[in-house]
Image: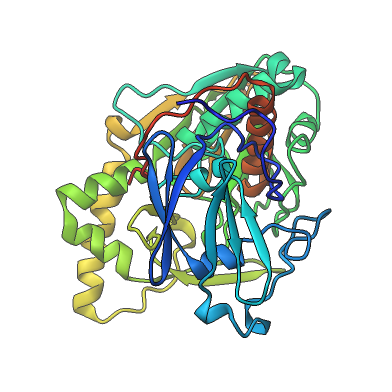
């Protein structure tokens, strides 16, 4: 089997490379769908409606913005679409009842087989193993360009936690790093905040007390995705940084104590933050999953958990599940602890990885961190673009038969 050349046979209004897939060999029309076969013996079925909707000709896709122009609602033939189909020079050619013609690149179609996971360079989240240690990337490599940023982004999105080492002891360095990827996510604490003890604090982080493991701002409808904490000074005794993988804990509960897992998944509770200027509240479960059952988010913050509005029997069952989750967060198999040094930055997924801090003595030295939040969409976007550029630069590699599926 030979792969296609790196120049696509058909322009599909897609920036990510797709020309290296196998060529098409045959197509077989059915009542509602078309089955196609590639040279490597892979097969797939596409509904006729899907094919009409995904036509990438200039009439159906804007040639500059790549946005869809075709509107199925205004096409009287859409629901009964059934084209004449042929393979022409390895390309799928379709002629529709209204005379419209569509052409589909073989590699583009192969990437979009219904059973194939989209390989866009963004890794799936992987639960921490008992011997987990976070990846370290040097500040120099991060600032140098694509390789360092790719390593940092991949580790952060896969593990939910990554460290940046040997940065400058400069105010606002966390801002400069964040803006490599996108704008800072502002909250009621501002866009960029300082973590140091101060008088009359409105948050426990601004004291010297120990902080129990938690996620930040679960009282928001969409809590911040990524938190970045840049250490400028850490000379005080104590104050170790604590982290736990909430996804790993939730998965363990799913298998070890399924009733408790379901209780935290299926019971929304109230989270609320209030001070003189803000009163931000939301009702949501501790554990949230997507349509496939994959864990999507953990909300855990005992300080701003609001009134538990449940009948007595349900409240008692919920407390039991909550304490099981909390106790597991403290187990060594789910945790990593370390002290941040000056010029070191930790970044973590705030909707997955819980963080805390040991108490410190402000009389023994200065401790000053600057932090901000960043939407995960910017990081995933940056990594996709890096992957796209790397694929464009890489030599063509023949595609072999595969049966890719997502891992859950």
Percent position (x, y) of residue 178?
73, 37
On the image, which quarter does residue 70 sit in?
bottom right
Q: Is residue 309 left or right of residue 388?
A: left
Where is residue 87 shown, x and y percent of the image?
A: 54, 49
| Picture residue at 53% right of the left edge, 28% below the top | 3
- The quadrant in which the N terminus is found is top left
Image location (x, y in percent) of residue 60:
72, 65
Q: Residue at x 60, y 31 (%)?
A: 153
In screen coordinates, is 251 left or right of 27? left
Q: Along the horizontal axis of the image, is 27 left or right of 201? A: left
Report x, y in % for residue 143. Answer: 76, 21
> How many numbered tags mark residues here?
0
Left or right of 408: which side holds 94?
right
Colouring style = rainbow
Q: Is residue 81 above or below residue 138?
A: below
The residue lying toward the viewer, choosing from 205 and 31, is 31
Query: In the rendered image, is residue 367 in sight?
Result: no
Q: Is residue 218 visible?
A: yes
- Comparing 283 with 76, the one in front is 76
* 17 or 109: nearer the viewer: 109
User: Residue 368's quadrant in the figure?
Assistant: top right
């Amino acid at each position: 089997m030979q792969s296609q050349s790196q120049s696509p046979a058909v322009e599909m209004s897609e920036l990510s490379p797709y020309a290296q897939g196998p060529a098409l060999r045959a197509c077989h029309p059915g009542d509602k769908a078309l089955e196609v076969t590639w040279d490597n013996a892979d097969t797939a079925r596409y509904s006729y409606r899907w094919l009409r909707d995904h036509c990438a000709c200039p009439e159906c896709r804007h040639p500059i913005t790549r946005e869809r122009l075709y509107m199925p609602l205004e096409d009287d033939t859409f629901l009964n679409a059934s084209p004449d189909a042929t393979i022409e020079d390895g390309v799928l050619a379709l002629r529709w009842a209204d005379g419209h013609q569509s052409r589909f690149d073989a590699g583009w179609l192969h990437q979009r087989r219904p059973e194939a996971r989209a390989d866009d360079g963004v890794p799936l989240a992987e639960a921490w193993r008992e011997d987990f240690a976070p990846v370290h990337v040097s500040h120099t490599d991060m600032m140098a360009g694509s390789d360092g940023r790719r390593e940092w982004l991949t580790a952060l999105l896969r593990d939910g936690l990554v460290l940046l080492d040997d940065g400058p002891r400069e105010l606002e360095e966390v801002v400069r790093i964040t803006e490599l990827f996108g704008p800072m996510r502002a909250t009621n604490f501002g866009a960029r905040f300082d973590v140091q003890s101060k008088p009359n604090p409105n948050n426990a982080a601004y004291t010297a007390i120990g902080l129990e493991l938690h996620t930040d701002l679960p009282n928001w409808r969409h809590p911040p995705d990524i938190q970045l904490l840049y250490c400028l000074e850490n000379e005080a005794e104590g104050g170790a940084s604590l982290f736990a993988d909430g996804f790993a804990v939730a998965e363990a509960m799913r298998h070890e104590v399924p009733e408790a897992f379901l209780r935290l998944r299926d019971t929304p509770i109230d989270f609320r933050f209030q001070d003189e200027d803000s009163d931000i509240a939301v009702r949501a479960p501790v554990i949230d999953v997507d349509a496939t059952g994959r864990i999507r988010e953990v909300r855990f913050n005992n300080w701003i958990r609001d009134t538990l509005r449940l009948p007595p029997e349900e409240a008692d069952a919920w407390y039991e599940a909550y304490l099981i989750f909390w106790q597991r967060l403290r187990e060594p198999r789910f945790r990593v602890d370390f002290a941040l040094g000056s010029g070191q930055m930790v970044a973590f997924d705030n909707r997955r990885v819980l963080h805390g801090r040991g108490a410190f003595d402000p009389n023994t030295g200065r401790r000053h961190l600057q932090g901000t939040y960043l939407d995960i969409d910017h990081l995933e976007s940056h990594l996709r673009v890096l992957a796209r550029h790397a694929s464009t630069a890489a030599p063509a590699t023949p595609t072999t038969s595969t049966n890719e599926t997502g891992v859950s």
